[in-house]
Amino acid sequence: MNPDETEALRQALTEELANLWHDLDAARRSAYQGAWSMQCNWLERRIKRCTQLVGATPWERIQLPLLEDGIYQRIHADLGIEVTVDMEEVARVRESINRRGAREGRPA
């Protein structure tokens, strides 16, 4: 495999990893009472495998609940990968979303 093909595969796997994080967030939201489900376990295993190959997805690409609940951080800690999340920025984004929702008449 030539370097261009290797880079194309790396980029594809990096994008797939970001999609897996999105799928994990959706699986948590659709699980009974928002709990951890078998689907969440399956997605976590896939995320860990891909992360070992291409590294951590930047926290800015991760859904807020996964950051707020420490899931992103825990999964990387399980792998021995140190990640730093700017929780102040996460809180600012959450506040902005909540304010916007309140203006539009949606519950926070």
Image (cartoon, rainbow, N blue to C red):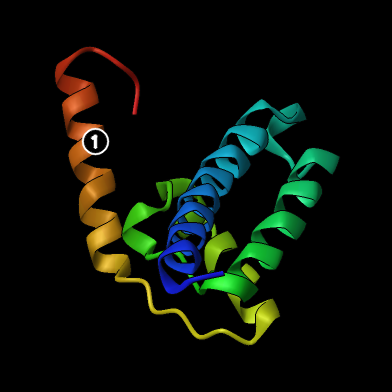
Query: Image quarter for residue 103?
Result: top left
Going by the numbered disc 1, the residue's amino acid type is Ile
Residue 16 is situated, as x and y percent measured from the top left of the image, at 53, 48
- Residue positioned 74% across, 45% down in the render: 40
Foreground residue among 19 and 104? 19
| Disc 1 target residue | 97
- Residue positioned 73% across, 40% down in the render: 35
How many circles with numbers are drawn on the protein? 1
Query: Image quarter for residue 45?
Result: bottom right
Q: Is residue 20 left or right of residue 56?
A: right
In which quadrant of the rendered image does the C terminus lie?
top left
Residue 2 is situated, as x and y percent measured from the top left of the image, at 49, 71
Q: Is residue 5 left or right of residue 30?
A: left
Query: Image quarter for residue 51?
Result: bottom right
In which quadrant of the rendered image does the N terminus lie?
bottom right
Foreground residue among 76 and 29? 76
- On screen, 45 above or below 26? below
- On screen, 44 above or below 29? below
Residue 53 is situated, as x and y percent measured from the top left of the image, at 61, 73
Residue 33 is situated, as x and y percent measured from the top left of the image, at 72, 30
- Residue positioned 28% across, 45% down in the render: 94
For label 1, count other residues whose C-alpha is less than 10 Å away and answer few (under 14), some (14-19) or many (20+): few
Foreground residue among 33 and 86? 86
- Residue positioned 23% across, 49% down in the render: 93
- On screen, 3 above or below 10? below
Q: Residue furthest front?
A: 2
